[in-house]
Image (cartoon, rainbow, N blue to C red):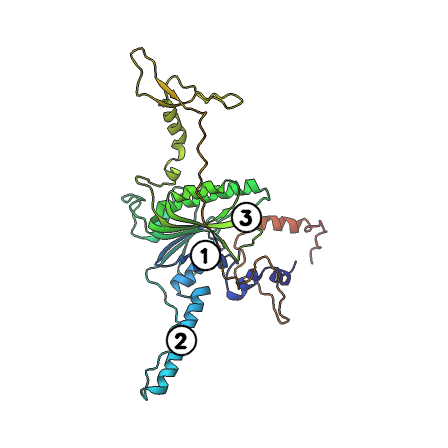
Amino acid sequence: MGKSSKDKRDAYYRLAKEQGWRARSAFKLLQLDEEFNLFENVTRVVDLCAAPGSWSQVLSRVLIKGETFGRCAWQDREAKLRQQMLNVFGTLDTAPEPQQTSPNAESEPKPRSDVKIVAIDLQPISPLPGIITLRADITHPATVPLLLKALDPDYDPINHSQQAAQPVDLVISDGAPDVTGLHDLDIYVQSQLLFAALNLALCVLKPGGKFVAKIFRGRNVDLLYAQLKIFFDKVYVAKPRSSRASSVEAFIVCIDFRPPQGFHASLEEPLGVGSRLPEMLADRNAELPISAPPERLQDTTGAWDVTPAKAQDGPDEDGIYDVEVEDLTAEPAKDIRWIAPFVACGDLSAFDSDASYRLPEDHVSLDPVQPPTAPPYKRAIELRRANGGAYKKAAPPAKG
């Protein structure tokens, strides 16, 4: 398959090369921003699983350079056109020396001050203007002090706690595992990656912050939405138009970070529990009355259950616990689940990521803007070439 055939099948792959993006995933973040205005009043951002750096490239061009894309760029062009029309009509009936304005005044980039952007990944990332890159593991406890030190050079991890310095307005993650084709396994691995990204975000987000991450929609994904709703006031599931409809990929957009009272995040104890979970379960089981069996005893029909629902504070004078058993004959409560709103992002006039488009006659296929710096499959390609290629062809004889 050549580059021209991929240009036909994937319009966003072609546009990414033409517009200078490192990967087509840049359009996903731009379309999410069009819908949710993610970059409003944002000056400090953390990009997790950032390689090859397309989302960091968007942050660099929007926040540091002040460029506009998509709907914002269209609105700026409309404002510029209206201003030009007002200047034209103003010169017809007023002063002989009208005040001239620069034709590019409305379109000049407006960079933001005090912008700090940190990109983290296990793979190396080629440098980007204004981006601090860290090669670190988002599941390791030492990553949070390293991140806070990159954001604030004066930060002292010894005398300052992680919770005392929550400087980040936005945490984004476009990370995904190498898919195997086994959907249940891929969804599980992706959920663990999301769990790590969320736990790091909880360590550094300030109240009112935002969190955006890739998810794989699968069975019981609504449980994930309900868990995120504990920490954020608004939770949405978004599907950008640049994301293929045939893919289970989607993006969870969490707005307005509001942690529960008394919650303290740490990578050593994920989501406040971590390795203490077995101990907590043992303590809870120890609080049950002596008459309760170690496990729930239930017959094959499920008609009775001896697990107590409530016990009194202590035994009576004869040393007997008074136990109230649940009435399972009553109608069980309905399974009430919170469903996150599903939002489709991107203008309908934009390219369809699942469609093929005819290329113009003078089209020239471009090379990728940023080739992979250290792809995990590099060694495999070298071994395959040494063994004669994909079809075991004989290696060419050595020259000389």
Q: Secondary structure at mark 3?
A: loop
What x and y, as percent, mark residue 196? 43, 43
The amino acid pointed to by label 2 is Arg
Secondary element type, mark 1: helix
Quarter of the figure that contains the N terminus: bottom right
Tell me the number on the disc at residue 32: 1
Taking the spot 41% from the left edge, 29% from the top edge, the residue there is: 278
Task: Please say if the residues under marks 3 and 2 sit with CB atoms less than 8 Å apart.
Answer: no
Who comes first in sequence, dot 1 or dot 3?
1
Residue 171, placed above or below residue 81: above
Which badge, 1 or 2, is on the more N-terminal residue?
1
Rounded to the nearest angstrom, the CA distance separating label 3 from label 2 is 43 Å
Where is mark 2, residue-wise? 82
Residue most extreme to the right: 394
Residue 48 rendering spot, x and y as whole percentages: 44, 50
Quarter occupied by the C terminus? bottom right
Q: Which residue is farthest front?
A: 330
Is label 2 in a helix, a strand or a loop? helix
Q: Which-is-in-front pick, marks 1 and 2? A: 2
Is there any visible trace of residue 139 in the rendered image?
A: no
Q: Quadrant of residue 332 in the image? A: top left
Where 192 falls versus 114 (above or below)?
above
What residue sits 68% from the left and 50% below the top?
390
Question: In the image, residue 254 lies at what x, y percent?
Answer: 41, 49
Give the amino acid at mark 3: Val
Can residue 70 be seen? yes
Query: Mark 3 — residue?
Result: 248
